[in-house]
Image: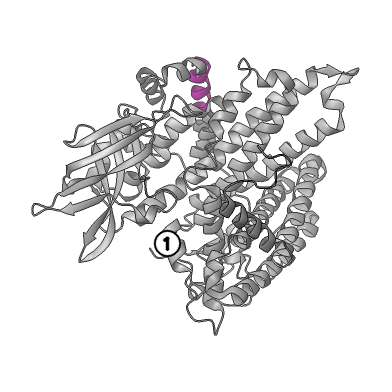
């Protein structure tokens, strides 16, 4: 897939990806300033959809859903009748026609209501039939989308296999072309949401295409001969999610059910997952808001030692951290939605950053919220234990966070490696391909004029932070070049360095998002009336800048060799090995 180019006529500057350009020392601020304002008319529709979602959510017995292991077929139809099963589907197919921003805003509400609800609808919309919307023919859209958008049918996404989890490129299911143009599919999938409830599945397999071993995307329908739903998984959380194995035994798939072109299956799968990762980021925003509201209510009401919990510094530190980080995450997630809405095709890094940052923040926020609730928070009568069980999978699925960090780092390093002379081919393509990349970013696709090293479009009152980001981008570029020159091809195996680089890129991107958002707030509302937002922006950017410096410094100064040696010794021994007392 060729990278798209977003160009502003007034600037004459172009880039295929904002985040990937950062490691080249380029800040394409015209892509992220001014802050992307949502469409006013759409926001009216979004508020109505959110209200409908909350009304339905109020009538759901979430513990009963866990006991029954399903939300209920009638509830799916109710959600469909309320317009909540086809949020981004074009209105001509029975959907709501929302933008990425509008879609994310409604999904925030799903996450605030219940994790299981958000996952069932997320599997259905974010990944289940997303491929049909993005790559389907007009005939496929007319055939499938009306029922899916209205909840008459439910969708699923079948990619993961027993031998292909994070390394989705090397799946083993295989489709073989028949003389009549159909494909015969054999294989097995696991951990498939909406497994026995789904009517339409987007499935992926290897296939020989023009003499080459490639991938194919297929639309499977319930009832196809040889398509079998297997056993259900017994999960820690999200117990109302129907998670299953799927088996394909000589399933004949007609040619009209091939999605996109044969051979493009892996690209289609990664395009879908990039979108799904944004949903996890914005869903984390919604769930974190719910946790924060619960925490604030409790700490204001609960009194100990003659004062409310909210008056203690250690409590204030936890709440302050949750508010500040949530502001940064929300800014980053909706800036990414804005990039999608303005037509940027390669948002693969930004979506991965939102997924990693959002799901990890949510986990730590849930832990702190439960801590502040005290002993009662440990009781099943409170919502915290269910929330923690439900969200623990978030850093794992749709790309485990450690794998996503490697993807972020290697994808961002690729254009830097191409620019450096005298290194030859350092082999960054292979690991990126295995993890899953949406679009290449080649240095030759960027106009090479000299660019400013500072953000110039932020509000003057934020110049200190804007200048600091410029310095960080320059340091990021130098650190990346040094890393590639030092390790060459071995850089693909330096995962601790990759993690630090990925985290630094994420913190730079988050600061840019906060600067863009608060600049617009200052322009619209004035600096003085926006003192609270400024306070949060100052705190977030200062803390993020310290994290960036720490991660870049640790690329050179660390104890990685000792840590890996200790791990190797433990693995060789097969146990801890240093116990004070022998059994």
Residue at the location (52% across, 39% down)?
104
Residue at the location (24% across, 34% down)?
228
Q: Is residue 4 visible?
A: no
Residue at the location (38% across, 45% down)?
160
Query: Can you say which quadrant of the picture contains the C terminus?
Result: top right
Q: Residue 351 at what x, y percent from top left?
A: 52, 50
Which element type, helix, strand or loop, lies under badge 1?
helix
Compare residues 95 and 290 and report the one nearer the observer.
Answer: 290
In the image, is 559 to the left or to the right of 167?
right
Residue 306 image-quadrant placement = top right
Which residue is most to the bottom?
Answer: 422
In the image, is 443 to the left or to the right of 551?
left
Q: Residue 519 at what x, y percent from top left?
A: 71, 51
Q: Residue 127 at what x, y percent from top left?
A: 40, 42
Query: Can you say which quadrant of the picture contains the N terminus?
Result: bottom left
Magenta region, main secondary structure? helix
Mark 1, other Cα within 10 Å: few <14 / some 14–19 / many ≥20: some
Colouring chosen for the image of the structure: one colour
Is residue 52 covered in magenta? yes
Position of 232 relative to 203 (above/below): above
In the image, is 349 to the left or to the right of 468?
left
Is residue 374 covered in magenta? no
Q: Residue 488 at what x, y percent from top left?
A: 56, 75
* Magenta residues (range): 47-59
Residue 572 image-quadrant placement = bottom right
Residue 449 image-quadrant placement = bottom right
Position of 81 relative to 22 (above/below): above
Which residue is most to the left?
Answer: 179
Compare residues 93 and 573 and report the one nearer the observer.
Answer: 573
To which residue does mark 1 refer?
433
């Amino acid at each position: 897939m060729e990278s798209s180019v977003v160009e502003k006529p007034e600037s004459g500057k172009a880039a295929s990806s904002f985040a990937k350009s950062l490691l080249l020392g380029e800040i394409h601020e015209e892509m992220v300033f001014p802050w992307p304002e949502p469409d006013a008319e759409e926001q009216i529709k979004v508020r109505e959809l959110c209200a409908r979602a909350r009304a339905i959510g109020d009538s759901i017995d979430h513990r009963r859903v866990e006991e029954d292991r399903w939300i209920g077929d009638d509830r799916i139809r109710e959600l469909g009748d309320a317009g909540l099963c086809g949020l981004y589907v074009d209105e001509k197919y029975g959907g709501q026609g929302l933008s990425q921003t509008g879609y994310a805003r409604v999904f925030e509400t799903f996450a605030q209501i219940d994790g299981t609800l958000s996952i069932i609808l997320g599997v259905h919309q974010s990944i289940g039939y997303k491929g049909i919307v993005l790559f389907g023919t007009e005939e496929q859209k007319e055939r499938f989308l009306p029922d899916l958008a209205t909840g008459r049918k439910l969708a699923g996404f079948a990619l993961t296999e027993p031998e292909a989890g994070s390394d989705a490129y090397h799946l083993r299911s295989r489709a073989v072309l028949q003389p009549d143009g159909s494909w015969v599919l054999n294989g097995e999938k696991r951990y498939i949401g909406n497994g026995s409830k789904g009517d339409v599945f987007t499935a992926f397999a290897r296939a020989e295409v023009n003499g080459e071993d490639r991938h194919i995307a297929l639309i499977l329908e319930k009832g196809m001969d040889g398509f079998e739903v297997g056993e259900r998984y017994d999960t820690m959380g999200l117990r109302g999610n129907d998670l299953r194995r799927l088996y394909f035994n000589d399933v004949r798939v007609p040619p009209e059910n091939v999605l996109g072109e044969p051979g493009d299956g892996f690209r289609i799968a990664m395009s879908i997952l990039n979108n799904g990762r944004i949903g996890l980021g914005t869903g984390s925003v919604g769930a974190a808001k719910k946790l924060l509201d619960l925490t604030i209510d409790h700490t204001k009401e609960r009194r100990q030692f003659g004062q409310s919990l909210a008056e203690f510094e250690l409590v204030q530190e936890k709440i302050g951290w949750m508010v500040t980080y949530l502001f940064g995450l929300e800014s980053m997630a909706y800036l990414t939605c804005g990039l999608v809405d303005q037509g940027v095709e390669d948002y693969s890094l930004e979506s991965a950053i939102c997924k990693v940052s959002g799901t990890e923040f949510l986990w730590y926020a849930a832990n702190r919220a439960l801590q502040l609730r005290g002993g009662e928070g440990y009781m099943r009568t409170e919502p915290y234990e269910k929330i923690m069980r439900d969200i623990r999978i978030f850093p794992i699925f749709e790309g485990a966070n450690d794998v996503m960090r490697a993807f972020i780092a290697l994808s961002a390093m690729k254009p830097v490696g191409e620019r450096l002379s005298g290194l030859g081919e350092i082999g960054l393509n292979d690991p990126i391909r295995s993890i899953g990349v949406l679009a290449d970013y080649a240095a030759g696709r960027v106009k090479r004029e000299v660019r400013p090293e500072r953000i110039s479009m932020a509000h003057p009152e934020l110049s200190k932070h804007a200048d600091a980001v410029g310095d960080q981008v320059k340091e990021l570029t130098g650190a990346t070049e040094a890393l590639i020159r030092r390790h060459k091809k071995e850089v693909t195996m330096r995962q601790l360095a990759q993690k630090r680089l990925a985290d630094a890129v994420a913190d730079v991107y988050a600061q840019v998002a906060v600067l863009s958002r608060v600049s617009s707030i200052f322009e619209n509302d004035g600096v003085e009336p926006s003192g609270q937002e400024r306070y949060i922006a100052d705190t977030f950017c200062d803390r993020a800048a310290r994290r960036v410096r720490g991660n870049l410094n640790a690329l050179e100064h660390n104890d990685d060799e000792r840590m890996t040696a200790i791990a190797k010794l433990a693995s060789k021994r097969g146990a801890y090995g240093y116990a004070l007392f022998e059994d």
